[in-house]
């Protein structure tokens, strides 16, 4: 297993002394990941029962976004030693020396504490506590413990990315429910086939830095089998909202059809075993998985709006 000690002196000295610009710090927050977090949290917030004050909506989404950014910054701080050695991540702010590890740690810590306090004080403390737990889970459980120690890193660690709709729900209701748990479950089960597809064509990079992703430890064939199995379970989970009253028949039809397409991509990834065609099938599944999750949550949101006719009820 790779040494988890962090020594950036050689890398940062070679490039510069840190103190990057605003864009560098924004990049440190993993904006692409943050955008998906914001969207799924927004859906959870809008699907939750109860009136919504527009200030509550804006405050909750801002706090959740900042909390997600904080988790991303702290993840980059801890993982900068392996980021420097992976082609996919070598241009991130810390490996290039645009931001120092100390700056990233301070930035992430301030954002994390601030986002939790704002959500707790201005919305409710249950949602704030759930956001704090999510940030801590991503940093301490996934980044520091699981990622470099077990091929189940993505399976267990994926919970961190599945909490945002539950936090959004809690921002409105002050609690969690079976409905918010189903939203959590959809993202939780989506994460393994999504990231394992990525790891299939990035396997050598993970191997070189000692991260035990499933293809590195169990082999590519076993990974393809797991992707296929998880894809079936994930698609089944996407049907659940219609059976608990969170969605209707229109959503169920869309989830079934789009889920069938998802499984076809997974089958193609399972069948293609060698060469560029195998990499292409894995890339196609990875790309479609992002689109699919976005569409699933979008249709949930649209159907809920149509159910109420003119839109949601806002408390002014």
Image: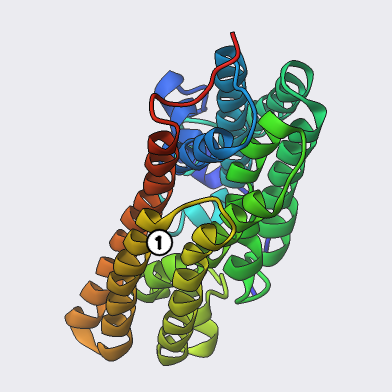
The residue under label 1 is: 252
Q: Residues within 10 Å of mark 1 (few under 14, many from 20)?
A: some
Q: Which of the two residues, 227 or 280, is positioned nearer the viewer here? A: 227
From what the image shows, is residue 175 above or below residue 263? above
Q: Position of residue 198 (x, y in %)?
A: 38, 67
Question: Left or right of 278: which side holds 112?
Answer: right
Residue 176 appears in the rendering:
yes
**Closer to the camera, 133 or 127?**
127
Instruction: State which quadrant residue 9 falls in.
Output: top right
Residue lying at 46% horizontally and 27% vertically, measured from the top left: 26
Q: Position of residue 128 (x, y in %)?
A: 75, 31
Residue 118 drawn above or below residue 78: above
Give residue 151's quadrant in the image. Answer: bottom right
Q: Residue at x 58, y 43 (%)?
A: 165
Image quarter of residue 204:
bottom left
Left of 100 or right of it: where is 145? right
Q: What x and y, as percent, mark residue 191? A: 51, 63
> In this view, which residue lies farthest toward the left?
277
Name the residue: 44% across, 88% down: 225
Residue 9 drawn above or below residue 109? below
Please provide percent x and percent y for residue 309: 39, 30
Residue at image point 60% right, 14% down: 315
């Amino acid at each position: 297993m790779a040494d988890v000690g962090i020594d950036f002196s050689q890398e940062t000295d070679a490039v510069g002394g840190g103190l990057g610009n605003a864009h560098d710090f924004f990049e440190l927050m993993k904006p692409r990941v943050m955008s998906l977090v914001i969207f799924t949290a927004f859906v959870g917030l809008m699907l939750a029962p109860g009136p919504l004050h527009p200030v509550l909506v804006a405050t909750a989404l801002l706090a959740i976004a900042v909390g997600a950014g904080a988790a991303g910054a702290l993840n980059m701080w801890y993982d900068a030693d392996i980021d420097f050695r992976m082609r996919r991540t070598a241009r991130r702010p810390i490996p290039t020396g645009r931001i120092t590890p100390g700056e990233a740690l301070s930035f992430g810590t301030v954002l994390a504490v601030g986002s939790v306090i704002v959500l707790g004080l201005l919305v409710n403390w249950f949602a704030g506590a759930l956001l704090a737990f999510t940030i801590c889970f991503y940093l301490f459980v996934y980044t520091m413990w699981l990622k470099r120690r077990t091929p189940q890193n993505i399976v267990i660690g994926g919970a961190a990315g599945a909490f945002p709709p539950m936090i959004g729900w809690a921002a409105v209701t002050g609690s969690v429910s079976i409905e918010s748990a189903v939203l959590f479950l959809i993202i939780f089960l989506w994460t393994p086939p999504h990231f394992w597809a990525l790891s299939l064509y990035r396997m050598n990079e993970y191997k070189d830095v000692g991260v035990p992703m499933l293809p590195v430890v169990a082999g590519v064939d076993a990974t393809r089998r797991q992707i296929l199995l998880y894809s079936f379970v994930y698609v089944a989970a996407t049907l659940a909202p219609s059976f608990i009253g969170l969605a209707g028949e229109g959503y169920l039809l869309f989830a079934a059809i789009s889920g069938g397409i998802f499984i076809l991509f997974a089958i193609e990834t399972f069948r293609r075993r060698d060469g560029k065609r195998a990499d292409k099938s894995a890339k196609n599944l990875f790309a479609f998985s992002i689109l699919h999750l976005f569409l699933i949550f979008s249709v949930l949101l649209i159907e809920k709006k149509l159910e109420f006719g003119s839109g949601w009820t806002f408390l002014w």
